[in-house]
Image (cartoon, coloured by chain):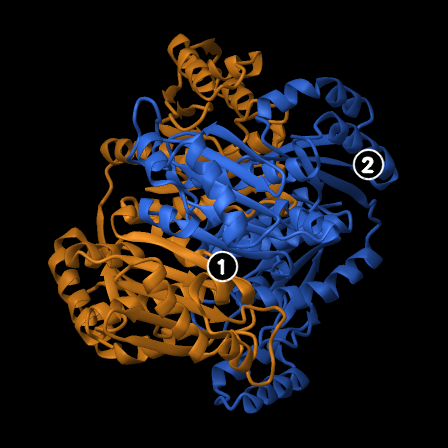
Chain colours: A blue, B orange
Amino acid sequence: MKVDIITIGDEILIGQTVDTNSAWMGAELNKVGISIRQITSISDNSTAIIESIENSLPNTDLIFITGGLGPTKDDITKHVLTNYFRDELVMYPDICEEIENYFVSANRPFLEVNRQQAMLPKKAKIIRNELGTASGMWFETMGKGVISMPGVPYEMKGLMAKIIPEILEKYDIDPFYHQTILLQGIPESVLADQIKDIEDALKKDEISIAYLPSTGIIKIRLTATETKADLIKDYLNQIAERFPGEHFGFGAQTLQAVIGEMLLADNKTLGTVESCTGGAIAQRIVSTPGSSAYYKGSIVAYAYETKEKMVDVNHDELWNHGAVSQQVVEQMAKGGLEKLNVDYCISTSGIAGPDGGTDEKPVGTVWVAIASKDRVISKRFQFRQNRERNIESTVVYSLNYLRRMMAGLT
Amino acid sequence: MKVDIITIGDEILIGQTVDTNSAWMGAELNKVGISIRQITSISDNSTAIIESIENSLPNTDLIFITGGLGPTKDDITKHVLTNYFRDELVMYPDICEEIENYFVSANRPFLEVNRQQAMLPKKAKIIRNELGTASGMWFETMGKGVISMPGVPYEMKGLMAKIIPEILEKYDIDPFYHQTILLQGIPESVLADQIKDIEDALKKDEISIAYLPSTGIIKIRLTATETKADLIKDYLNQIAERFPGEHFGFGAQTLQAVIGEMLLADNKTLGTVESCTGGAIAQRIVSTPGSSAYYKGSIVAYAYETKEKMVDVNHDELWNHGAVSQQVVEQMAKGGLEKLNVDYCISTSGIAGPDGGTDEKPVGTVWVAIASKDRVISKRFQFRQNRERNIESTVVYSLNYLRRMMAGLT
């Protein structure tokens, strides 16, 4: 079964709104075994709407349309679709009453433009929208379905919750399965080279593979029919075993959540002393709800003076070796361990850029240290030119460095 | 001039990645007077790529394609386009050397798959990518252009910075002028109501207005032909004068950069003591290059213990009033002022959610204080239910609170 999504709205084309509806629908439909063939975003324009439908219809069984159902003049989807499918708008009195109640209960005036939203196509199936005033409309043409929904994300989601079960009942869908493995600190090309044999085996088993890289992290996603779920898990475990240092999780896990679980399991606490990351590691850690159970805080020691004053970095060493040095980053981690009274402390010091680089320490040079009660480990990284990416790289490399230390891998 | 965008990648169709590239490109192209007709997202599949190009070509002058240029087997865009445009892949030795240097300087192995990225179409114009290994490719066919770029957002953005000026030179585009004014802490509907008269005047002058809201901040963008540049500036100054507390900048300025300039001009320093924001304010401040000249650091005092130990919050007050209280947040600011040895210190303490709310202090309750040598000001905010938004709101409200204090507005 093939499905297309069409999102309607000038605000998407001028980049004012990022189309998150499509991604959400894509993910939800995939879960039940429905693949999206194509997503098209077009303007609030009659010709564009009709052309995109005519372009999609021959290639799909079902089209989901979002957007253009508001009460204002620039929203034309309902009229265009009703004309196109040779339907006619009629008043649905019960829906009109619902909309009126909606306005009355919100203490807002019920205007003629709002009443017009109960004028809906006669032959199409109307899907009630309890979260707003624009109803869903399910047109049928030549055995194919065209479903129009409002573009407001939570209203669309409410309607989809009603629509998906109906689709599963109506169509014969072969569900598929996919699972993702997460790795940190291995370049995509190196990874691909080192799992060539697995890729070949996957191909024979008709399991598709996708590499999804983001800064410092690669996700590998395997997809096949549901009958191959166990096989997919086997393959992912093979990859996991091959990269114990890099592999940190599966599916929707995050590095910070994995570390949180390890700390909780060991009953240990964590602190951070950040220079070049400027609070980014702290922020990543506290993005996990419940992190206050193991995370005590951070000292963002941005200035030399703050490094000395807050975490007792030795004045002479700081001025002799510079803030971006093994000596200083290790002192920062040890100082933080004591000052924050924690079991593990991560510290960072580096030149994020764009300025501040030297021949010896170019932009992208970053030292990371981790102190525990027993020992201090540290490592120099050489990232690149982009400030934002250097900070993000430092965050994920240092979190995985901690994971490896706790797991006895370094 | 009409332009289409095609984004290629299975990860978009299954909803694993939200297509933010299209929105960014739409916004950038609009700025220079180029409208997007349609955005299409398709899978990494040869037929889909060719069909989408053939569907777009008759309706557009230029097609931007992103994605599918990685070194791995699932990335097929380069091969499909080269075949489709009857071009052939040849080795570009200088690009090969650049890619090799890129790997060598990062201490990463240079593999055959990486070398293959220097195999590029012979007739197409190659656009060098200094931020990654996949080059841009500009094909020409029947007077129309098809430009292929990698899907990694910052690489795509780097290439677009080179491509846009070439487009403006090659095509006859009627340039727009637009300028943006930035306001913090005023709801969109209130703002719209208070500048109704200006909106009417703009309409008469054929200047279009767009409200671009993000968390806690609204940008108003005025757009017209270039002859109206001075008129646009006048209108924006009128808005600025009407909202001295809310207006903090124009165009690409940021709240953190504006504050940085004020601190530098006054030769003052800044520190932060963060609880609920968990380092997010620090991170925002250090995102401005050169911030080390005025920003000394942050104490992320996430745990009660850390608040007492690191910034001398009084034990009894902490336990009597709770961490989210005026007493504690003011002590945090004063403590930070002293400990970090700075002229201004921002402190935050709140319930970001999803858990931890009470009847008296529901999720979204946030206290912010700012201490200077002379005085301490503090304010209670009531945000909403979403953790991420509550943190972001606290960041922008507290930065503007500091700006207002420094400007003598509070």
The picture places residue B52, in percent across and down from the top left corner, at: 54, 36
Position of B261 relative to A59 (above/below):
below
Helix, strand or loop at mark 2 = helix
Helix, strand or loop at mark 1 = loop
* Tag nearer the camera, 2 or 1: 1
Count the labels in the image.
Answer: 2
Q: Is residue B13 visible?
A: yes
Q: Of the numbered discs in the image, which one, if any, rests on residue B278?
A: 1
The picture places residue B294, in percent across and down from the top left corner, at: 26, 52
Q: Tag 1, which chain?
A: B
Residue A362 is left or right of residue A127, and the answer is left
Circle 1 Cα neighbour tier, 10 Å, few/some/many (<14 / 14–19 / ≥20): many
Quarter of the image containing the C terminus of chain A? Answer: top right
Q: Which residue is mark 2?
A: A233
In the depicted view, which residue is nearer to us: B381 or A282? Answer: A282
Q: Image quadrant of residue B130?
A: top left
Report the residue at 56% width, 54% height from top: A341
Quarter of the image containing the N terminus of chain A? Answer: top right
The picture places residue A329, in percent across and down from the top left corner, at: 45, 37
Report the residue at 55% width, 64% height from top: B305
The picture places residue B30, in percent across and down from the top left corner, at: 33, 49
In the depicted view, which residue is nearer to us: B359 or A169? Answer: B359
Residue A103 is left or right of residue A268, and the answer is left
How far apart in space, not on screen, are marks 2 and 1 (Cα)?
36 Å
Residue A20 is left or right of residue A195, and the answer is left
Position of B372 relative to A305 (above/below):
below
Tell if the residue under mark 2 belongs to the same chain as the one under mark 1: no
| Identity, as a three-letter code, of the amino acid under mark 2 | Lys
In the depicted view, which residue is nearer to us: A254 or B54? Answer: A254
